[in-house]
Amino acid sequence: MKALIGVTACIDNSNGRFFVNPGYINAVYKSGGIPIILCPVQRREIPDILRKINGIILTGGGDINPLILGEEPCNNIGEISPIRDTFEIALTRLALQYRIPILGICRGMQVMAVAAEGKIVQDIQSSICHMQKSPRNVKTHTVNIKKDSILFSIYGKKKIAVNSFHHQSVSDCGKIFRACAFSADGIIEAMENIKNSFALGVQWHPETLYHSNQCEKNIFTALINEAKKYKEDFKNVY
Ligand SMILES: [Mn+2]
Protein backbone atom coordinates (compact mmCIF):
# COMPACT_ATOMS: atom_id res chain seq x y z
CA MET A 1 0.00 0.00 0.00
CA LYS A 2 1.25 3.43 -0.90
CA ALA A 3 1.18 6.38 1.49
CA LEU A 4 -1.71 8.83 0.97
CA ILE A 5 -0.48 12.40 1.19
CA GLY A 6 -3.02 15.17 1.78
CA VAL A 7 -2.06 18.27 -0.19
CA THR A 8 -3.84 21.47 0.85
CA ALA A 9 -5.63 23.40 -1.89
CA CYS A 10 -5.24 27.07 -2.72
CA ILE A 11 -8.41 29.14 -2.99
CA ASP A 12 -8.70 31.30 -6.08
CA ASN A 13 -11.11 33.97 -4.86
CA SER A 14 -11.45 35.72 -8.21
CA ASN A 15 -12.55 32.58 -10.08
CA GLY A 16 -14.20 30.81 -7.15
CA ARG A 17 -12.21 27.60 -7.43
CA PHE A 18 -9.84 25.40 -5.45
CA PHE A 19 -6.55 24.41 -7.07
CA VAL A 20 -3.14 22.88 -6.46
CA ASN A 21 -0.12 23.65 -8.62
CA PRO A 22 1.03 20.48 -10.41
CA GLY A 23 4.55 20.57 -8.90
CA TYR A 24 3.24 19.36 -5.51
CA ILE A 25 1.12 16.62 -7.03
CA ASN A 26 3.88 15.38 -9.34
CA ALA A 27 6.50 15.50 -6.59
CA VAL A 28 4.36 13.30 -4.31
CA TYR A 29 3.43 10.90 -7.07
CA LYS A 30 6.95 10.56 -8.43
CA SER A 31 8.29 10.00 -4.90
CA GLY A 32 6.01 6.99 -4.47
CA GLY A 33 3.05 8.55 -2.66
CA ILE A 34 -0.54 9.16 -3.73
CA PRO A 35 -1.61 12.81 -3.55
CA ILE A 36 -5.07 13.66 -2.20
CA ILE A 37 -6.16 17.29 -2.50
CA LEU A 38 -7.57 18.67 0.76
CA CYS A 39 -10.17 21.43 0.67
CA PRO A 40 -11.27 23.39 3.76
CA VAL A 41 -13.74 21.68 6.10
CA GLN A 42 -14.98 22.38 9.63
CA ARG A 43 -12.56 21.66 12.45
CA ARG A 44 -14.74 18.86 13.82
CA GLU A 45 -14.51 17.10 10.44
CA ILE A 46 -10.71 17.15 10.26
CA PRO A 47 -10.22 13.89 12.23
CA ASP A 48 -12.22 12.12 9.50
CA ILE A 49 -9.56 13.26 7.02
CA LEU A 50 -6.64 12.42 9.29
CA ARG A 51 -7.82 8.86 9.81
CA LYS A 52 -7.48 8.27 6.09
CA ILE A 53 -4.19 9.96 5.16
CA ASN A 54 -0.60 9.20 6.16
CA GLY A 55 1.11 12.54 5.57
CA ILE A 56 0.40 16.18 4.77
CA ILE A 57 1.85 18.85 2.52
CA LEU A 58 0.89 22.38 3.49
CA THR A 59 1.32 24.18 0.19
CA GLY A 60 2.38 27.70 -0.73
CA GLY A 61 -0.04 30.51 -1.45
CA GLY A 62 -1.16 33.92 -0.26
CA ASP A 63 -0.44 35.71 2.98
CA ILE A 64 -1.49 34.70 6.47
CA ASN A 65 -4.21 36.95 7.86
CA PRO A 66 -2.45 39.27 10.37
CA LEU A 67 -5.63 39.46 12.49
CA ILE A 68 -5.05 35.81 13.48
CA LEU A 69 -1.87 36.99 15.18
CA GLY A 70 -3.59 39.99 16.73
CA GLU A 71 -1.94 42.41 14.30
CA GLU A 72 -3.31 45.01 11.88
CA PRO A 73 -2.33 44.48 8.22
CA CYS A 74 0.66 46.46 6.95
CA ASN A 75 0.43 48.36 3.65
CA ASN A 76 2.18 45.65 1.68
CA ILE A 77 0.02 42.77 2.83
CA GLY A 78 -0.97 40.48 -0.05
CA GLU A 79 -4.20 38.61 -0.64
CA ILE A 80 -5.45 36.66 2.36
CA SER A 81 -7.87 33.77 2.66
CA PRO A 82 -9.29 33.49 6.19
CA ILE A 83 -11.10 30.22 5.38
CA ARG A 84 -7.89 28.60 4.23
CA ASP A 85 -5.95 29.95 7.24
CA THR A 86 -8.50 28.62 9.73
CA PHE A 87 -8.60 25.19 8.11
CA GLU A 88 -4.84 24.77 7.68
CA ILE A 89 -3.99 25.93 11.20
CA ALA A 90 -6.55 23.52 12.70
CA LEU A 91 -5.36 20.74 10.36
CA THR A 92 -1.75 21.30 11.43
CA ARG A 93 -2.58 21.31 15.14
CA LEU A 94 -4.54 18.08 14.90
CA ALA A 95 -1.95 16.45 12.61
CA LEU A 96 0.71 17.21 15.21
CA GLN A 97 -1.47 15.58 17.87
CA TYR A 98 -1.97 12.55 15.64
CA ARG A 99 1.77 12.60 14.88
CA ILE A 100 1.10 12.61 11.15
CA PRO A 101 4.21 13.63 9.18
CA ILE A 102 4.01 17.18 7.79
CA LEU A 103 5.93 19.04 5.12
CA GLY A 104 5.20 22.77 5.01
CA ILE A 105 6.30 24.69 1.94
CA CYS A 106 6.62 28.51 1.93
CA ARG A 107 3.25 29.67 3.31
CA GLY A 108 2.92 26.12 4.67
CA MET A 109 5.92 26.65 6.94
CA GLN A 110 4.34 29.89 8.16
CA VAL A 111 1.10 28.03 8.89
CA MET A 112 3.10 25.54 10.98
CA ALA A 113 4.63 28.39 12.99
CA VAL A 114 1.25 30.03 13.61
CA ALA A 115 -0.24 26.65 14.59
CA ALA A 116 2.52 26.35 17.20
CA GLU A 117 1.90 29.87 18.47
CA GLY A 118 4.87 31.38 16.68
CA LYS A 119 5.12 34.70 14.83
CA ILE A 120 5.24 35.95 11.24
CA VAL A 121 6.94 38.96 9.66
CA GLN A 122 4.21 40.51 7.51
CA ASP A 123 6.57 42.08 4.97
CA ILE A 124 10.31 41.34 4.94
CA GLN A 125 12.64 44.34 4.79
CA SER A 126 16.03 43.11 3.59
CA SER A 127 18.80 43.82 1.12
CA ILE A 128 18.44 40.22 -0.08
CA CYS A 129 15.70 39.57 -2.63
CA HIS A 130 13.24 36.96 -1.33
CA MET A 131 10.68 37.56 -4.10
CA GLN A 132 12.67 36.61 -7.15
CA LYS A 133 11.69 37.59 -10.67
CA SER A 134 13.55 34.64 -12.17
CA PRO A 135 11.63 31.47 -13.12
CA ARG A 136 10.54 29.12 -10.35
CA ASN A 137 13.16 26.49 -11.11
CA VAL A 138 16.06 28.95 -10.68
CA LYS A 139 17.93 29.14 -7.35
CA THR A 140 18.71 32.73 -6.40
CA HIS A 141 19.91 33.00 -2.78
CA THR A 142 21.87 30.83 -0.40
CA VAL A 143 20.79 29.19 2.85
CA ASN A 144 22.93 27.91 5.72
CA ILE A 145 21.72 24.67 7.29
CA LYS A 146 22.38 23.69 10.91
CA LYS A 147 24.40 20.52 11.05
CA ASP A 148 22.36 18.64 13.66
CA SER A 149 19.09 18.79 11.74
CA ILE A 150 16.77 16.60 9.67
CA LEU A 151 17.32 19.05 6.84
CA PHE A 152 21.09 18.50 6.96
CA SER A 153 20.55 14.75 6.78
CA ILE A 154 18.47 15.34 3.63
CA TYR A 155 20.89 17.73 1.89
CA GLY A 156 24.17 16.46 3.32
CA LYS A 157 25.71 19.93 3.20
CA LYS A 158 25.70 23.13 5.20
CA LYS A 159 25.29 25.66 2.40
CA ILE A 160 22.74 25.33 -0.38
CA ALA A 161 21.08 27.64 -2.91
CA VAL A 162 17.29 27.92 -3.10
CA ASN A 163 14.55 29.65 -5.03
CA SER A 164 12.58 32.31 -3.15
CA PHE A 165 9.03 33.58 -3.59
CA HIS A 166 8.02 35.00 -0.25
CA HIS A 167 7.62 38.43 1.27
CA GLN A 168 6.49 37.07 4.62
CA SER A 169 8.66 34.95 6.90
CA VAL A 170 8.65 33.18 10.24
CA SER A 171 10.18 35.25 13.05
CA ASP A 172 9.32 32.84 15.88
CA CYS A 173 8.94 29.13 15.10
CA GLY A 174 6.65 28.50 18.05
CA LYS A 175 6.84 25.99 20.84
CA ILE A 176 7.60 22.71 19.13
CA PHE A 177 9.75 23.77 16.20
CA ARG A 178 13.26 25.06 15.93
CA ALA A 179 14.86 27.00 13.08
CA CYS A 180 17.31 24.82 11.15
CA ALA A 181 18.28 27.02 8.19
CA PHE A 182 18.84 30.74 7.63
CA SER A 183 19.54 33.05 4.71
CA ALA A 184 22.48 35.46 5.01
CA ASP A 185 20.16 38.24 6.29
CA GLY A 186 19.03 36.06 9.20
CA ILE A 187 15.61 35.15 7.80
CA ILE A 188 14.46 31.70 8.98
CA GLU A 189 14.40 29.56 5.82
CA ALA A 190 13.56 26.19 7.39
CA MET A 191 12.33 24.76 10.67
CA GLU A 192 11.59 21.32 12.05
CA ASN A 193 9.94 19.49 14.90
CA ILE A 194 12.10 18.82 17.91
CA LYS A 195 9.59 16.43 19.48
CA ASN A 196 7.70 13.31 18.43
CA SER A 197 6.83 13.25 14.77
CA PHE A 198 8.36 14.37 11.46
CA ALA A 199 7.45 17.98 10.65
CA LEU A 200 9.64 20.01 8.34
CA GLY A 201 9.00 23.48 6.97
CA VAL A 202 10.98 25.10 4.16
CA GLN A 203 10.56 28.64 2.94
CA TRP A 204 11.65 27.80 -0.61
CA HIS A 205 9.82 25.74 -3.25
CA PRO A 206 11.33 22.25 -3.69
CA GLU A 207 8.31 21.21 -5.79
CA THR A 208 9.56 23.36 -8.68
CA LEU A 209 13.19 22.23 -8.29
CA TYR A 210 12.89 18.47 -7.81
CA HIS A 211 13.04 17.58 -11.55
CA SER A 212 16.73 18.36 -11.76
CA ASN A 213 17.84 18.35 -8.13
CA GLN A 214 18.21 15.13 -6.15
CA CYS A 215 18.23 16.88 -2.76
CA GLU A 216 14.89 18.57 -3.36
CA LYS A 217 13.50 15.23 -4.46
CA ASN A 218 14.85 13.78 -1.19
CA ILE A 219 12.63 16.19 0.80
CA PHE A 220 9.56 14.52 -0.69
CA THR A 221 11.06 11.05 -0.33
CA ALA A 222 11.69 11.80 3.37
CA LEU A 223 8.03 12.77 3.83
CA ILE A 224 6.76 9.67 2.00
CA ASN A 225 9.07 7.37 4.01
CA GLU A 226 7.87 8.92 7.27
CA ALA A 227 4.26 8.65 6.08
CA LYS A 228 4.73 4.94 5.38
CA LYS A 229 6.25 4.45 8.83
CA TYR A 230 3.39 6.40 10.38
CA LYS A 231 0.92 4.16 8.64
CA GLU A 232 2.50 1.06 10.10
CA ASP A 233 3.17 2.39 13.60
CA PHE A 234 0.22 4.56 14.51
CA LYS A 235 -2.72 3.84 12.27
CA ASN A 236 -4.35 1.56 14.77
CA VAL A 237 -3.79 3.83 17.74
CA TYR A 238 -6.45 6.39 16.74
MN1 LIG B 1 14.01 33.28 0.82
Image (cartoon, rainbow, N blue to C red):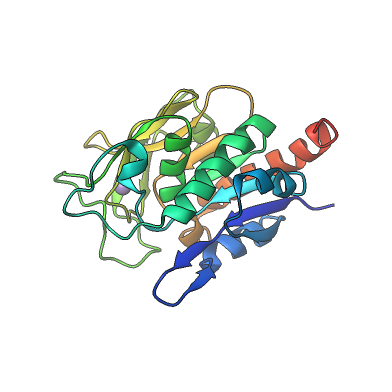
One can see residue 224 in this view: no
Residue sitting farthest toward the left: 127
Percent from the top left, x then y, of residue 70? 30, 36
Percent from the top left, x then y, of residue 156? 50, 36
Q: Quadrant of the C terminus?
A: top right
Residue at 58% in and 43% down:
91
Q: Quadrant of residue 188?
A: top left
Q: How many marks?
A: 0
One can see residue 127 in this view: yes
Of 69 and 163, the residue lying toward us: 69
Residue at 47% in and 30% down:
116
Of 104 and 129, the residue lying toward us: 104
Of 160 and 150, the residue lying toward us: 150
Percent from the top left, x then y, of residue 222? 63, 42
Percent from the top left, x then y, of residue 108? 46, 47
Q: Quadrant of residue 140?
A: bottom left
Left or right relative to 28: residue 234 = right
Quick check: 87 above or below 149? Answer: below
Left or right relative to 30: residue 146 = left
